[in-house]
Image: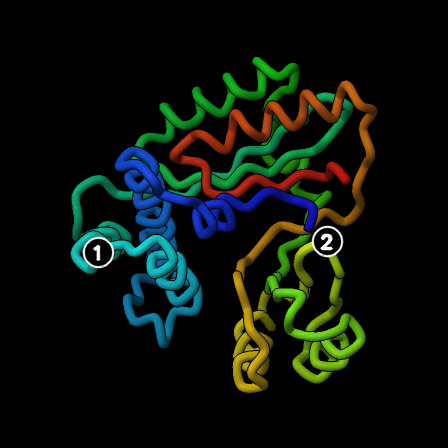
């Protein structure tokens, strides 16, 4: 999958220290708050699919119930420090396009940190709309290789209403239209197909392959963005 999901990294993060656990809780808490806001204030995961996905992340990092409840309160406007979702557009070395999704209670702080990461890597932020057209919103489900062959999963994907299945070294990626993600997930669960992660993503319409030097600089930029607590997802056109 072209793109770098902070949710994916949170899910598989080994929180071996209090600092690492705190960082994971911060990111998932913001994901919960954003899910409530995007769901029109709906706090029932049965009626808010994005919140259901955020709950899965919370379970993956063993987040306490009271922490989850506080995050939901913030998303519904009842808690202290409202969370807003922002999207930054930019270009990395070699012309790689970036969409960076953040959830923050201080947009000035977040904007300054994201800008610093781009500037330090030799990239630059772009005006709204300068990059968005190179991506389209999709759903993606990550399925372990143990689930079956790519041909079998492709048949399941077609019957579920998915668009494509891509085989990677360690996982299958099943892509859907954004509005079809809930029904595809439900179909797979009913069929007993294991799912390791479900996300909404911004999938690039095309990718580019930068040279070795530019690739290394982009990887450094991605790492610099990933360590920012406010950053939730990073999507790029880098192959």
Q: How is the image coloured?
A: rainbow
Crowding at mark 2 (Cα within 10 Å: few <14, some 14-19, many 20+):
few
Q: Judging from the image, what secondary structure is the residue with disc 1 in?
A: loop
The x, y position of residue 134, in whole percent, is 73, 43
Whether residue 231 is situated above or below residue 58 in the rendered picture: above
Q: Where is residue 222 in the image (x, y as percent from the top left)?
A: 58, 30
Left or right: where 11 falls relative to 146:
left
Residue 96, image x, y percentages? 73, 30
Residue 93 occupies which quadrant of the picture? Answer: top right
Image x and y of residue 112, in percent? 43, 20
Residue on which disc 2 sits: 169
Q: Quadrant of residue 19?
A: top left
Relative height, residue 39 to residue 188 (above, below): above
User: 193 or 205: nearer the eye?
Assistant: 193
Quadrant holding the C terminus: top right
Q: Mark 1 points at which residue?
A: 64
Label 2 residue SS: loop
Which image quarter: residue 220?
top right
Q: Judge whether 206 appears above or below 91 on screen.
A: below
The CA distance from mark 2 to mark 1 is 34 Å
């Amino acid at each position: 999958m072209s793109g770098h999901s902070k949710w994916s990294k949170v899910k598989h993060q080994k929180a071996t220290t209090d600092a690492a656990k705190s960082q994971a809780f911060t990111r998932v808490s913001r994901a919960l708050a954003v899910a409530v806001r995007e769901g029109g204030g709906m706090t029932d995961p049965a009626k808010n699919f994005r919140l259901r996905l955020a709950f899965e992340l919370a379970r993956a990092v063993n987040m306490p119930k009271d922490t989850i409840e506080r995050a939901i309160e913030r998303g519904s406007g009842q808690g202290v420090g409202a969370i807003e979702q922002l999207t930054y557009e930019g270009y990395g070395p070699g012309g790689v396009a970036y969409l960076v999704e953040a959830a923050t209670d201080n947009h000035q702080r977040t904007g300054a940190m994201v800008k610093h990461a781009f500037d330090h890597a030799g990239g630059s932020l772009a005006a709204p709309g300068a990059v968005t057209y190179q991506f389209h919103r999709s759903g993606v489900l990550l399925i372990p290789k143990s689930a079956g062959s790519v041909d079998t999963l492709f048949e399941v994907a077609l019957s579920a209403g998915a668009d494509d299945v891509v085989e990677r070294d360690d996982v299958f990626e099943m892509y859907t239209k954004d509005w079809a993600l809930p029904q595809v997930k439900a179909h797979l669960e009913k069929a007993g197909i294991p799912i390791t992660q479900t996300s909404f993503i911004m999938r690039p319409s095309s990718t580019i392959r930068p040279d070795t030097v530019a690739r290394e600089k982009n990887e450094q930029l991605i790492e610099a963005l990933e360590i920012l607590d406010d950053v939730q997802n990073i999507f790029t056109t880098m192959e």
